[in-house]
Image (cartoon, rainbow, N blue to C red):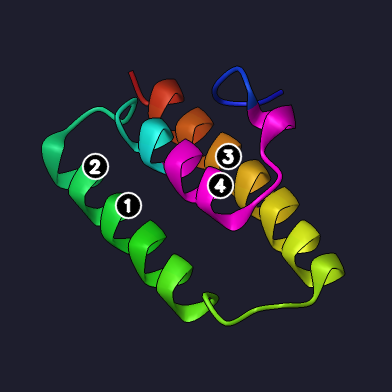
Amino acid sequence: MSPLPGAELVRTPLQLYRYLLRCCKLLPSAAVQKHYRHAVRQSFNSHADEDDPERIRMIIQRSISDADWILDKYTKKK
C-alpha cells in the first residue's frame, strides 16, 4: 500500500523528492512535518551524486516503503 496515489509513477530522484514532500503534508503536526521535510531534503542532497540506475531504483523503493511506514505510524496514534 502506498501513502499517496501515484507512488508507482515515481521514476526519478526529483519525482521522489516531490512525492515525499507531499507525503509530509499528511503528517499530523507542524513540528513533525518540519522534521520529516528536513530529513527528506538532507537525504536528497546526500544522494544527489548517485548515478547508478539500480541503486537509484533501490533508494526509490525503500523511500516509498519508509514513507508508508511513517504515515501508518502517525495515523494509528489517533
Q: Is the residue marked by circle 4 packed among few (<14), some (14-19), or many (20+) residues within 10 Å? A: many
Residue 25 highlighted magenta (yes or no): no
The dot on residue 33 is 2
The residue most toward the left is: 30
Compared to 65, does 62 lie above or below? Answer: below
Q: Residue at x 47, y 50 (%)?
A: 17
* Spatial CA span between label 2 and label 1: 5 Å
Residue under numbered circle 4: 16
Residue 13 highlighted magenta (yes or no): yes
Lower sequence index among marks 1 and 3: 1
* Spatial CA span between label 3 and label 2: 15 Å
Amino acid at dot 1: Tyr
Amino acid at dot 4: Leu
Lower sequence index among marks 4 and 3: 4
Q: Quadrant of residue 3?
A: top right
The dot on residue 36 is 1
Q: Residue at x 56, y 47 (%)?
A: 16
Q: Position of residue 13 (x, y in %)?
A: 59, 56
Q: Is the residue marked by circle 1 packed among few (<14), some (14-19), or many (20+) residues within 10 Å? A: some
Give, as a single range, the part of the protein colored magenta.
Answer: 7-20
Is the N terminus in the top left, top right, bottom left or bottom right quadrant?
top right
